[in-house]
Amino acid sequence: MSDLFEYDDAATPLTPDERNGLIPTHITMRSELNEIEQKNILDADNWVFQRKRNALDEGFLRRLHKRMFGEVWSWAGTYRTTDRNIGVAPWRIQTDLKQLLDDVYFWIENKTYVPDEIAIRFHHRLVAIHPFPNGNGRWSRLVADILAVTLSQPRFTWGQFNLQTVSEVRRRYIDALRKADNHDISALIEFARKL
């Protein structure tokens, strides 16, 4: 069980209470955890594109996280209550998320950015808020895909790789996120479309 909860410097570590939220009792290795999470995510991916979804509905965003991780973690779909190495303070999550949803509605209505940029800016800010104990990157990438499709764009290509297990691709993704943190969104847009 030694490597089950090991994280690299770009991952969000879980608290002991959150670790206790692991539902499958047979998992002892990180690779097993990644595999069962990936299966749950693929099931959610199939579900989400069966009909039109509103990526800008806070209730839907929580349900989507639960769909993606609910067979693996008991806290799936529940906002975190502890501070992290990334993200806003827990008490700010709902307020910041509401502000972001309002911003995205404004960007769409006023054509502030082209559709791809709207979806990628949405993704970046979701990652920055980091509402859940874990799975925020995977969840926010799927949310960006949903918004892109809603805006009559194809899904982003970042979904072709499991960024949890392909280290070079994950490093490029993290680098693009860090550039976006410094107000250069272009690398993240390029990563999402040209991978």
Image (cartoon, rainbow, N blue to C red):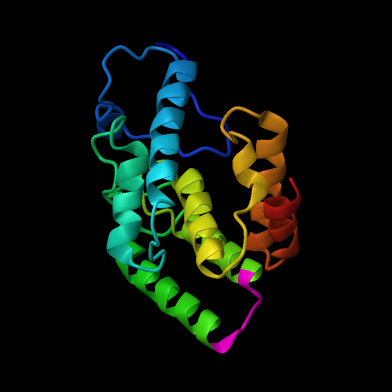
Q: Residue at x 45, y 55 (%)?
A: 87
Task: Give the quadrant of the C terminus.
Answer: top right
Q: Nearer the viewer, residue 161 or 152?
A: 152
Q: Residue at x 60, y 27 (%)?
A: 165
Figure check: 64 above or below 95: above
Q: Is residue 16 left or right of residue 176?
A: left
Main SS type for the magenta part? loop
70 and 175: which is toward the camera = 70
Magenta-colored stretch includes residue 158:
no
What's drawn in magenta, residue-wise? 110-115
Res. 122 visible in picture: yes
Q: Quadrant of residue 55?
A: bottom left
User: With respect to residue 110, does 127 lie above or below?
Assistant: above
Q: Residue furthest front?
A: 50
| Quadrant position of residue 67 | top left
Evaluate whether residue 91 shows in this view: no
Rendering coords of residue 98 (x, y %)? 35, 72
- The residue that appears at 57% across and 65% down in the rendered structure is 119
x, y (%) of residue 81? 27, 50
Residue 125, horizontal then vertical, whole percent? 51, 63
User: Which residue is at a point 62% across and 58% down the rendered structure image?
Assistant: 154
Q: Residue 162 at x, y = what percent?
A: 58, 33
